[in-house]
Image: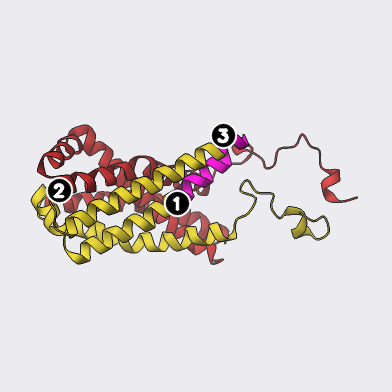
Amino acid sequence: MSQRDQQNPARPLSPHLQIWRWGPHMLVSILHRATGDGMALVGLPILVWWLAAAASGPGSYATFQAVMGSPLGLLVLVGVSWAFFNHMTSGLRHLVLDIGAGYELDTNRRWATASPIIGILLTAAFWAVILLK
Amino acid sequence: MGNGTPIGRVRGLGTAHEGAHHWIVHRMTAIGNLVVMSYLLVSLALLGDYGHASVVEWLSSPLAATAIILLVISVFWHARMGLQVLVEDYLHEPGTKLAILAALNLAIIGGGAFAIFSVATLAFGRTA
């Protein structure tokens, strides 16, 4: 009798979130998916609009600038830039994990804690450069 | 799906029913994104202002136009793969899944083509 035959069909494929004791790696994993898909759904339309408005002429571009330069627009841009830097740092962490490194418990916890913090710091640094130049 | 070896029993059981190629291309485009997004962010930081004239002058140079066209390809490809995983993980009805993935392809290819054409328009000198 194979292992599959012994399985209770009512069992879920894998335990869901509430089963596990929370650790920083779980937040990083969830944020990685949320920021990546958030950028795909919000950031890419803004990128396309920006490029198309620039190509369409000063009038279209002025509309883009008025909307994205408004307080709400800037909030969205700050959010997208945070999503980028957060996704980039957790993505770099993933690339390291993918080559098989960084699975020791304390190392893993340290970088899981560090990556969202570095993401926030990079976002702040980017906007400081933009706003202070 | 075999029932002999352990790998044979699990092969094809993920939500996508396949995976290694998708997984590798997702990482490869991630590395591409690191390069082209670094270029974009440094360019934005160095740009004098964000008015139409400055942006067009920058975007119509051969280097910037090439970089941003490559950015659109790498980022849109990577984003499509990420959204595909999202759909495969959370939508369980095969018909809905197929419809959403078809719509996703249309949106990504349409949006990407529009973005690339816009940059090419500027690079080839027609500033409307």
Q: Position of residue A100 (x, y in %)?
A: 56, 66
Q: Position of residue A75 (x, y in %)?
A: 25, 37
Q: Nearer the viewer, residue A99 or A64?
A: A64
> What kind of element bears circle 2?
helix
> What kind of element bears circle 1?
helix
Q: Nearer the viewer, residue B123 or B59?
A: B123
Q: Position of residue B56 (x, y in %)?
A: 13, 54
Q: Determine if residue A20 is in view.
A: yes
Q: Nearer the viewer, mark 3 or mark 2?
A: 3
Q: Position of residue A96 (x, y in %)?
A: 49, 64
User: Could you tell me how far apart the alpha carbons at marks 3 and 2 are, in whole angstroms?
Assistant: 45 Å
Magenta segment boundaries in residue numbering: B80-97
Residue B96's label in the rendered image is 3
Instruction: State whether the magenta stretch is mostly helix, strand or loop.
Output: helix
Q: Nearer the viewer, mark 1 or mark 3?
A: 3
Q: In the rendered structure, which amino acid carries the disc numbered 1?
A: Thr
Which quarter of the rendering shows the N terminus of chain B?
bottom right
The residue at the point 42 percent across, 59 percent down is: B30
Q: Are marks 1 and 2 in contact (CB under 8 Å)?
A: no
Which residue does the numbered mark 2 point to in the structure image?
A131
Q: In the rendered structure, which amino acid carries the disc numbered 2?
A: Leu
**Relative to A98, is B109 on the left or the right?**
left
Chain for disc number 3 = B
Q: Which shade is chain A?
A: red
Residue A113's label in the rendered image is 1
Q: Which shade is chain B?
A: yellow
Q: Say if the magenta span includes residue B110.
A: no
User: Could you tell me how far apart the alpha carbons at marks 1 and 2 are, in whole angstroms?
Assistant: 28 Å
Marked residue nearer the N-terminal end (1 or 2):
1
Q: In the rendered structure, which amino acid carries the disc numbered 3?
A: Thr
Q: Say if the magenta span includes residue B87.
A: yes
